[in-house]
Image (cartoon, rainbow, N blue to C red):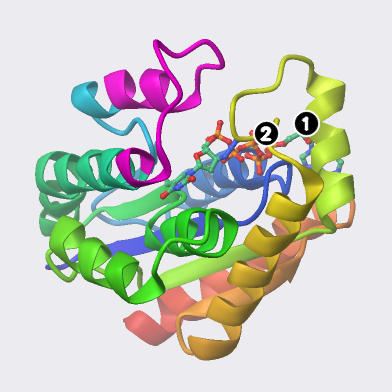
Amino acid sequence: MKGKFIVFEGVEGAGKTTQMRRLLHFIQQKQLAEAGVVATREPGGTKLGKELRCLLLETESVELVSNRAELLMYAADRAQHVEAFLLPELAKGSIVLCDRFTDSTVAYQGYGRGLNLDLIKQLNEIATGGLQSDLTLWLDINVEEGLSRVMARGKRDRMEQADLEFHRRVQRGFADLAEENRDRIFRIDADRPEDEVAEAIQSIVISKLEAWR
Ligand code: Z5A
C-alpha cells in the first residue's frame, strides 16, 4: 500500500466536514499529492454505504434500530468502504481523507451506547482487515458548542437528537482514544475560528508528509 490515510474525528459540529474540504483544497492547490487526493466519509462512502447511512441516520426509520443492529450496520458500511474504495485508492498512491472511521465506533457505540469495547475492537478488525489511519485529526470541541453549531444549521438527525450525557460520553471516548494512541491521533483545538483550525491542520499534515517521504 503506497497511499496515506488521514481521518477526521470528533463530536458533532466539531467542523470535520468543513476542515476536510479545506484540507482537500489545500493539498490540491499546493500540489502535495503526486498520485492525487480524494475525500470520503463513513457512513456513506460507497453505494451500499449510502443506503445504510439513510437507514442509520434518518429520524423516521421503519422501526427503532437496536444498539447491536446499529453497531453491525456501521461495520457493514466500513467493510464495504475498505474493500471497494479505501484499499483501491491507497494502492494507487492517493492521499485519502476520510470523515470518521473506526474511532467513531469506539466512541459512539462503545462509550456512547455502552457496548463492549473488546467486541468493538474485534469487529473493527474484521471490517477493516487491519487497515488503520496513518494520521487521525481529532477536532476537539466542547460538546455544547458543537451541538449549538449543528442546531443553528437546522434539522437534526437521529444521533444528534440523543441526550447531552450521551454526547459527553462520546467525547470522553475520543479523549481516551487520543491518550492511548498518541502516535496516530493528534488533538486539534476546534473551538477557534475556522481559519485558525485550518492552519493548525495544514501544519501537522505538511510535517507528516515530509516525515513519510
Ligand atoms: N457514527 C457512529 O455512531 N458510529 C460510527 O462508526 C460512525 C459514525 C462512522 C454521522 O453523521 C453520524 O454517524 C455521527 C456519528 C455516527 N453522528 N451524528 N449525527 P454525520 O456525518 O452527518 O455527522 P457528523 O459527522 O457529526 O458531522 P456534522 O454534524 O456535520 O459535524 P462536523 O462535520 O464536525 O461539522 P461541520 O459540518 O463542518 O460544521 C458544522 C457547522 O459548524 C457548520 O454550519 C459550519 O459552517 C460550522 N463551523 C465549522 N467550523 C466552525 C468554526 N471553526 N467556528 C464556527 N462555526 C464553524
Quadrant of the image for the C terminus? bottom left
Residue at 39%, 10% in the rendered image: 62
Q: Is residue 213 above or below residue 11?
A: below
Circle 1 SS class = helix
The crowding category of the residue bearing disc 2, from other C-alpha atoms within 10 Å (few below 14, some 14 to 19, many at least 20), is some
Give how far apart the Cα atoms at labels 1 and 2 are: 8 Å
Residue at 42%, 74% in the rendered image: 209
- Label 1 near ligand 1 (CB < 8 Å): yes
Quarter residue 160 falls in: top right
Residue at 37%, 39% in the rendered image: 70
Q: Which residue is labeled 1 in the image?
A: 150
- Where does the image place residue 206, in percent across and percent down from the top left? 53, 71
Q: Is residue 182 visible?
A: no
Q: Amino acid at mark 2?
A: Glu
173 or 83, which lies in front? Answer: 173
Residue 160's disc number: 2
Quadrant of the image for the N terminus? bottom left
Q: Is residue 140 visible?
A: yes
Q: Is residue 124 above or below residue 108?
A: below
Q: Is residue 60 on the magenta stretch?
A: yes
- Label 2 near ligand 1 (CB < 8 Å): yes
Q: Which residues are magenta?
A: 50-70
Q: Is residue 94 on the magenta stretch?
A: no
184 or 130, which lies in front? Answer: 130
Q: Nearer the viewer, mark 1 or mark 2?
A: 2
Q: Is residue 188 left or right of residue 120?
A: right
Circle 2 SS class = loop
- Where does the image place residue 208, in percent across and percent down from the top left? 47, 78
For ligand 1, the image quadrant comes to top right
